[in-house]
Amino acid sequence: MFAAVLGAGSATAAPQHQLSYVNLGDSYSAGSGVVPTAPGTLPDCMQSSANYAHLVAHRFGYRFTDASCGGAQTGDFFAAQYKGLRPQLDAIGPNTDLVTLMIGGNDGMVFAGTVQKCLTAAAEALGRGSPCKDTYGDSIVRELRTVTFPKLVNAMAAVRAKAPNARVAVISYPWIMPSKYEPCPAFPVAAGDVPYTYEIQSTLNDSLRRAAAQTGVTYVDATTPSVGHDSCKPVGTRWIEPILTTEQMVPVHPNALGERKMADITARTLGLSR
């Protein structure tokens, strides 16, 4: 269990270590779309000062660095994503105590690409059938298993090597869509493609779980608790915003409630305390 001490101790107390915490990852990790934006960060990263990692760091008084950035792929752990940024791995080192990350959804354009493909297919089919599944079949799932998975293993292994004394945790992605069709006018995917998109996200999260197990990284399951809080649910219940009638500027991403819930899940899973 981690511990950190806030403020100065008594005159006779020995100095205690303040836990060093670094957050890595993509827009789900950065909290893109949740206001306010973290001051001093690159605007293109759309990093929120109310993302789950900021909330965890504030709650427990950790010394905190957030290197997450919207649009990041696993490759951006090793190379600069934008001019003025350093590779995300540069933020960690032997003195890092805790690392959290969310990554993988942008490799192969899994989230944005799948959403766009299935919305376009639904429009062309007038919402009938399963046009996205009929067109793309198992190609997206196959790419996740054969291409994205080894990239996840490589990225997590690199984090473990660069921060050998840190506890490393990967947070899974909360559900975007329900497992079965239900009326969802704010996310107009064809009825038959709702379980198809669910399967794709399930495969991504399973890839994260398996990569974590292979590299000695803690898997934080934010997916199971998000059942019933997908983008088709009303405001105040949903953790993920839909395409239409979104409450924030970045749709298909966690809202403020989702970020708070991921902070709670992360802290509980890791047994964090002051």
Image: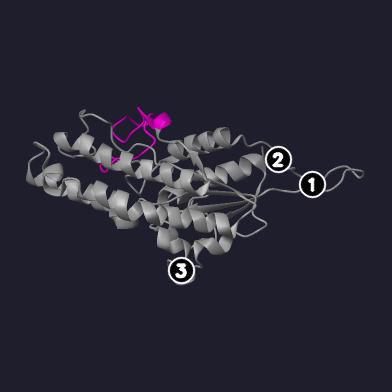
Predominant SS of the magenta segment: loop
- Name the quarter where the N terminus is drawn: top right
The alpha-carbon separation of the residues under discs 1 and 2 comes to 9 Å
| Picture residue at 29% right of the left edge, 56% below the top | 108
Residue 234 forms part of the magenta stretch: yes
Q: Is residue 250 above or below residue 185?
A: below
Q: As rendered, which of 267 and 163 lies closer to the eye?
A: 163
Magenta residues, start to end: 224-245
Q: Residue furthest right?
A: 12
- Mark number displayed over residue 16: 1
Q: As rendered, which of 23 and 61 lies closer to the eye?
A: 23
| Picture residue at 53% right of the left edge, 46% below the top | 216
Precedes in sequence: disc 1 or disc 2: 2
For residue 14, side relative to residue 236 (left or right): right
Q: Quadrant of residue 247?
A: top left
Q: Secondary structure at mark 3?
A: loop
Q: Amino acid at mark 2?
A: Ala
Q: Are there few (<14), some (14-19), or many (20+) residues within 10 Å of tag 3?
A: some
Q: Give x and y (percent) for residue 11.
A: 91, 45
Can residue 107 be seen by looking at this rendering? yes
For residue 122, side relative to residue 55 (left or right): left
Asked if labels 2 and 1 touch by Cβ distance under 8 angstroms, the answer is yes
Q: Which residue is mark 2?
A: 3
Q: Residue furthest front?
A: 214
Q: Amino acid at mark 1?
A: Gln
Q: As rendered, which of 254 and 117 lies closer to the eye?
A: 117
Q: Give x and y (percent) for residue 179.
A: 27, 31
Q: Secondary structure at mark 2?
A: loop
Q: Amino acid at mark 3?
A: Ala
Precedes in sequence: disc 1 or disc 3: 1
- Mark number displayed over residue 80: 3
